[in-house]
Amino acid sequence: MMGTTRSTEGLDTRRRKLLFRSWHRGTREMDLILGHFADTTIDALSDAELDEYETLLELNDVDLLSWITGEQPVPPAVDSAIYRKILASSRSKSF
């Protein structure tokens, strides 16, 4: 997979921006993890979930990847419902 497989048609501006940011992280691993998650769920996230997701997107890729892969324990402030959805999404996808 090289990039988004989802059209932005029908998405509001906020979701379009989040989809773009998910696929343009800076590290390919996080592009794939967050891009896949956004492709499959961005249209179904509530406003509160979008808020949480935006907060996660502000975090450093190296930290996020180490938590998702289990190299480092997930800080309680990060271990949210949306983080767990991302984790489940990454585990269900074979890259």
Image (cartoon, rainbow, N blue to C red):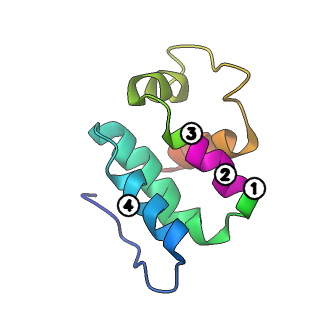
Q: Which residue lies at the image location 66% right of the left edge and 29% below the top edge? A: 78
Residue matched to label 3: 56
Check disc 4 and give the amino acid type: Phe
Q: Position of residue 10 (x, y in %)?
A: 51, 86
Image quarter (top left, top right, bottom left or bottom right) of the N terminus: bottom left
> Helix, strand, or loop for circle 1?
helix
**Vertical placement of 45 versus 84: above or below?**
below
> For numbered disc 4, what is the local secondary structure?
helix
Picture disc at residue 20: 4
Q: CA distance from mark 2 to mark 1?
A: 5 Å
Q: Is residue 84 visible?
A: yes
The amino acid marked with disc number 1 is: Ala
- Which residue was labeled with disc 1? 48
Q: Farthest residue toward the front?
A: 13
Q: State the mark number for residue 51.
A: 2
**Label 2 to label 4, Cα distance in Å?**
16 Å
